[in-house]
Image (cartoon, rainbow, N blue to C red):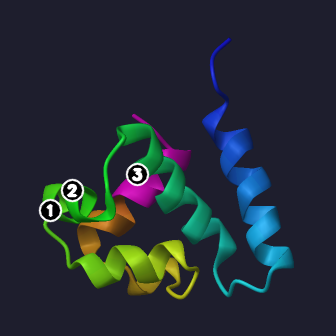
Amino acid sequence: MPVDLVRMRDRYAERLRREGAENPRVAATVAAIRGTAGETVEEFALRLEIPIPAVTAAEAGLLPLESLPAALAFTVRRFDHPG
């Protein structure tokens, strides 16, 4: 059975929201993208050519979409709008 990544992300975002994350949808989207790639934080940051702290801050829900490095923001936007 295929995994519905959007549903998984939305459920995780809701959990993060309940836990008080400032940007739960961004955090959950970054976690879903990195997780499906099977990459560590370091590998993900290296592939996108962004600082490791940007990935960890995004996954912690500390950064809004507008504050993400360009490559990560592009990747997050494509999650909802592939193609």
Q: Are marks 1 and 2 in contact (CB under 8 Å)?
A: yes
Q: Crowding near pointer 3: few (<14 within 10 Å), some, many (20+)?
A: some
Q: Amino acid at mark 3?
A: Arg
- Label 2 sits on residue: 43
The percent position of residue 3, horizontal first and vertical second, equals 64, 26
Percent across and percent down for residue 30 are 47, 60
Q: Earlier in the sequence, mark 2 or mark 3?
A: 3
Query: Considering only vertical position in the picture, is 63 above or below 24?
Result: below
Q: Main secondary structure of the magenta part?
A: helix
What amino acid type should be assigned to the residue bearing mark 2? Glu
Q: Residue at x 26, y 72 (%)?
A: 70
Question: Is 16 left, or right, of 28 in this rendering?
Answer: right
Q: Whole-percent x and y of residue 34?
A: 40, 51
Q: Check the picture and name the quadrant holding the C terminus.
A: top left
State if disc 3 and disc 1 touch (CB < 8 Å). Answer: no
Residue 80 on the magenta span: yes
- Which residue in the structure is indicated by mark 1? 46
Q: Which residues are magenta?
A: 75-83
Which of the marked residues, 1 or 3, is nearer the chain's N terminus? 3
Say which element carries label 1.
helix
Task: Write down the quadrant of residue 76 in the picture.
Answer: bottom left
Quickly name the residue at label 3: 34
Q: Position of residue 75 (x, y in %)?
A: 36, 55
Disc 2 residue crowd, few under 14, some 14–19, many 20+, Cα 10 Å: some
Q: How many angstroms separate mark 1 from mark 2 (CA)?
A: 5 Å
